[in-house]
Image (cartoon, coloured by chain):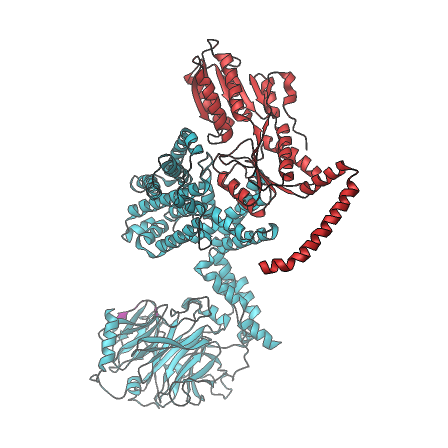
Amino acid sequence: MNGLRRLWYRYSPQLLVGELLEKRWMEPAVPFTLLILVFSVFILTIPGYTSLPQLQQLMRSFPEQGFVAMAMAISILSGGIDLSVGAVFATADFLTLYLLQVQEWPLPLVIVAVLLWGALIGAINGGMIAYAKTRPFLTTMVVLIVLRAAYNKITGMYATELAGASSDSGAWDYLGIGFVLGMPINMFCLIVIGIIAHLYLTRIRSGVHIMAVGSSRKAARHAGIDVKRSLFLAYVLSGMLSSFAGILYAARQNSAGTDTGVGWEVNALAAAVLGGISLNGGRGTMSRALMGAAIIFLLINGLVQLGTHGSLTTAAIGAILLAAVGFNVKFVKNKSKILQKIYVSPNLVEFTPPLSIERNSGTVFAENDRLKDAEAIALDCIEGPEDVILDRNDHLYTVNRNGSIIRFLAPNYEQRDEFARIGGRPLGMAIDRDENLIVCVAGMGVYGVKPDRTVFRVTDETNRTWYRFKDDSRLWLADDLDIAPDGKIYFSDATTRYDLSDWALDGFEGRGNGRLVCHDPATGKTHTVLANLAFPNGVCVSHDGRAVLWVSTWLCRIYRYWIAGEKAGTVEILADNLPGYPDNINRASDGRYWLALVGLRSPVYDLAMADPAFRLRMVKQIPPDEWLCPGINFGCIIKFDDSGTVHESLWDPGGISHPTITSMREHKGYLYIGGLENNRIGRLRLPEADPTWTGSDSYWGKRKQESPKPKLAAARTEHVASA
Amino acid sequence: MSDRRTRLMPGALAGLCVAAAVAGWANTANAADPRADLFQKFQTSVKGKTVAWVPVWLGVLESEWTRVMKAHFDDYGIKLVMRDPNFKSDVQLQAVSSLINDKPDILIVQNPTTTLLARELKRAMDAGIKVIQVNMASNQLTDAYVGADVPKLGHMLADELIKTCGGGKGSGKVAILQGEATAAYSLDMTKAATEALNADKSIKIVSSQPTNWDANKASEVTTNVLQQNPDLCGIMSVWGPQTAGAAQVIKNAGKQGQVKIFVASDGQPADCDMLEQGLFTKNVSYRADTQGEAIVNAVLTLLQDGRPAGTTQYAYYTTNYWVSSKDDRNYCFVVPKE
């Protein structure tokens, strides 16, 4: 039973839904569902609805409305509206019939002429709107009225000729009733042009410009986009799409009745709104417009086929559209809220009580006052030194909340110097063989700073997990790193589901959202070594260089991942059930390792971790400031060895100077202490430590400055920097 | 194939013999009652058949046709399938196209224009569906046409106009209110009337415009015509409901009785009402109720005609009746209360 429960929480469907809702392509979920629903209902109610002739008939009848909806969509996406689509469509229909059957022009010439006609009307619309700055609504409405009046007048004049005329052209018949690949030719045109239009709006510069102008005209102008030309183009394209629909319609219907295109602009507008295209512009796709149009089309067609009375059909469609549009608008608006409500998906984590930390308990974790003597460096000169590191010249580097690397100069560390500015939120650091500072930057990836302060990107992506909806190829929360003797950089990507500021939510989940990633500077390749880790945090290459030690913060465990030797590639638990939440690990001078505990476990929180439903209710029902959170207002550093045995612990009871300790670094007999939220760096003298030991020596051997630089690596980093 | 046929031959022959024997026996049995035999044949060809019907919309006229058809078809055991495109030509085309796939025995259509359905009607007949066109025909001739002799209506109205306005009896200025310009009914009537009117030198057609069957449009047109031609003598209109708009304009202009209005219509109650109120001068009614019966007759004929679709071109022209006073009320049908 418990096993089942564990399985349920581990593979919670909520996880799937949450990540699904996050996808951009989920925005048209409502119209898509409605489309499927409408289609299914008619399959059930209309006999033979899915027969081939019937499907071909549907495909034959739909495309013109699809084109007009696309025309409307382009104008809406550009931030305006084109009410003249129906009238352009009707005039194009008439013009095609007139030129072909009365004037007897050849078909290709007719098509070109009619497309030009559409472009001309589009140019009039676009010219007025873009260059004369008239309102799109009024402008296109006037054009609609003028065109409609002209259409009625002209069709009346040529009624007799048109009523009797016909064309014997085979190509014309083909355009009206032909098939391509078993599909009506007009449907084929719709698909091809639909794809082209989609690619145009998403991939081609001028199309993307139209979308940009629709999103924000001001921003587009500031970005150097020719707003007027983009607007102009949008209406020209809209006109051409409508007129092309007119040509297809003429070929199929062979008729220019007074009702041709009447109200089509309203249908197209409804289609766009139903498809979820924002009337404010810039948000939406061609496929959504087509989806909306298809729903309206299927509804009308289906209700008529069911033999519904005409006025009932109209009323029913009105009601359905109203409901659908209302729901869709609400859905698009509240999707993020729904997402917020269901995104957090807690996992079952079962703890057993850890060793006591009580002062007199006699355990290795027993509270003491050893950190109380730590002197404060850079007090109030630094904000959130998550990690600290010292170079061969004893200069102290730390990360700052504002995205920069701050250096305090030896020997007294009073002079503050902004060493480099990377951006993001820099966290764990390491120094490579060439004295480059390699930094994990939350939200950005792994970056490097050369001794001459040049910032370069090391990596910002890894391989994507194929079975996840969420694109996790980007590094989300690169946390800590270390460098193996062969130069490979191992780093933790703590979670792929939350930003740094929402770390507590990831804690509530206690789920394997993170991963251990390896970047090989020699090949430039990055790949995920271990996936589905519960907040992998500190990373440290063992003294012998044969393993990577890393911790899982939420599971309170230290792991060892072998990178060399016969166990290479395997992972094992080194220490389990720590009394606190482990953070960074770093080498100690005595061949052991320092480990920062960023917070302390409490029985209450452990209990909460064993009850995912409780945590879910908590996140949903009470405000964030009242959430039960891991206790991080404490300070503790422990030391363990390669066998996982913990040897000592250093405490700052109550976390007075050093709460939330995230890092510590030993250097020449001193321990430097950093904290995620702290305003200082602690410095504690270690009486028994080797006063000459430094991290750089430990990693790269005793060398001063003039270390022979491997040419290849240097060339590569320069290449990255210039890129 | 031939192999199979030879194998099946003896069986088929045997079957035929038995069938013939049974039929012969039946014949002899019923020989005493040839009238029952006739009814039997009628039953076989008519009962359980499907008739599909696609009007332009379900207006008063179309509803009357539908009502009459339904009443008779129910009696004969014919299934009536109706689609209402509600005045949308693209929807009507879709409806007809879908119905062809459903393969009814008879397809009845009312064409909104001469061209819209032409191609599909041809396709229907190719698919073995017999097609009847009602009142508003298309460029495609089909198995049967039921409806008014439209050019004749045009002549009748024109003759009335000439009688009233021509030869110095009036100003000679007349206007024509068309329906949908490309609909056969309006097109042919206007053409016939125009020819007849043009033949008389004393008559001048000052306007001939489409109103799209719409009273509002007709009133706009009439307002303009009247402004430009205050001495207008007569109006002929191809259909009743649209004419109501024109008649109202004439009345409001205080020219009721001066401007004569001649209308061809289907005899819906409003036509007679208008006439009785003096808004119409004269109305020629082709009676939708009797037309409905003519459609039923055409259906019966085609169902009993063993020849394939597209063979015949029957015409059922309906009779027209002048309505000029209260006494002619019987030429207007009564919409039954539901």
Residue B185 in view, yes or no:
yes
Q: Please give left or right for residue A407 compared with residue A45 in the image.
A: left
Q: Please give left or right for residue B42 compared with residue A562 in the image.
A: right
Picture quarter with the N terminus of chain A: bottom right
**Viewer-nearest residue: A521 or A426:** A521
Above or below residue B85? Residue B14 is below
Which residue sits furthest left?
Answer: A706
Q: Which residues are magenta?
A: A419-425
Q: Which percent across, then down, holds residue A377?
A: 31, 76
Q: Quadrant of residue A127?
A: top left
Q: Quadrant of residue A682?
A: bottom left
Q: Which percent across, then down, holds residue A186?
A: 43, 48
Q: Which chain is red?
A: B
Question: Is residue A683 magenta-colored?
Answer: no
Q: Please give left or right for residue A489 compared with residue A572 in the image.
A: left
Q: Which percent across, then down, holds residue B122?
A: 51, 41
Chain A takes which shade in the image? cyan
Q: Which percent across, then down, holds residue B109?
A: 56, 37
Picture quarter with the C terminus of chain A: bottom left
Above or below residue A587? Residue A378 is above
**Viewer-nearest residue: A28 or B173:** B173
User: Across the whole image, how many numbered discs are drawn on residues?
Assistant: 0
Residue A674 in view, yes or no:
no
Above or below residue B335? Residue A239 is below
Q: Quadrant of residue A137?
A: top left
**Viewer-nearest residue: A397 or A199:** A199
